[in-house]
Amino acid sequence: MNPDDKTTETTTETVDTEATEQTPEAVAETIADPLDAITDPDELRKAAKAQRSIAQRYKKSSVKETPALTTTKPDISDDVVAKVNRLDLSEKKRQFGYKNGLSPEETDKLFKYAGNDKPEEALKDPFFQSGLTEFRKQNSVKSAIPRSTNRTTSSVEGKSFKDMTPAEREKNWGKITNQE
């Protein structure tokens, strides 16, 4: 073709419409509303009524197809629930005891004393406080280890413990143990 030539050639080709991309205007023309072709008002009412019934059927079928949300709890055995509750209580006791400077035994006694009440309130109770003090005293006595002493060997009437006879030791026991 000559560039100076102003005539155009037209060629006809067959194009597969499924493989080509269409413009929005072309799509709108091909999807024309069939109700636009109806000019009789009675026929238009019948067609609109048919469209509404189709829409209602579609709406009902789409509602049935959606799965219902279930709020049922998963099937968990009572044994598992009991174990989880015990672990939860154990962790609560441990954290409470650490926070308030209590030993595990003291924490167990506090929770037993508190029952269904709050353990914070039971800890402030003067009755429990006196019991806690006494419990701590008993534990310190049970676990008491004698202190080391810097005392020299005692002597009574010029004799050391080692040099005394058993009768002299018995007679002077109060002086030896500093009870007299």
Image (cartoon, rainbow, N blue to C red):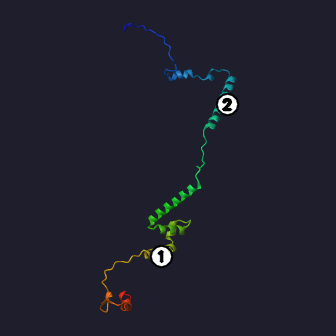
Q: Quadrant of residue 114?
A: bottom right
* The C terminus: image quadrant: bottom left
> Within 10 Å of the Cα at label 2, are there few (<14), some (14-19), or many (20+) other Cα atoms?
few
Q: Is residue 78 above or below residue 126?
A: above
Can residue 43 be seen in the rendering of this structure? yes
Q: Is residue 34 above or below residue 160?
A: above
Q: Is residue 59 above or below residue 74?
A: above
> Within 10 Å of the Cα at label 1, are there few (<14), some (14-19), or many (20+) other Cα atoms?
few
Q: In this view of the protein, which residue sits in the foreground, 55 or 104? A: 104
* The N terminus: image quadrant: top left
Residue 139 position, x and y percent, is 45, 74
Which label is found at residue 112? none
Tell me the residue at 51%/69% (across/down).
109
Kind of residue sitting beneath label 1: Glu
Kind of residue sitting beneath label 2: Ser
Instruction: Report the Cα–Cα distance between label 1 and label 2.
Output: 85 Å
Tell me the residue at 68%/21% (across/down).
40
Tell me the residue at 67%/25% (across/down).
47
Q: In this view of the protein, which residue sits in the foreground, 60 or 50? A: 60
Secondary structure beneath label 2 = helix
Q: Which residue is mark 2?
A: 53
Can residue 180 be seen in the rendering of this structure? no
Residue 115 position, x and y percent, is 56, 67
Tell me the residue at 48%/68% (across/down).
105
Q: Is residue 179 above or below residue 115?
A: below
- Does residue 178 appear left or right of residue 89 in this picture? left
Q: Earlier in the sequence, mark 1 or mark 2?
A: 2
Task: Indicate which label's residue lies in the foreground, 1 or 2.
Answer: 1
Q: Which residue is mark 1?
A: 134
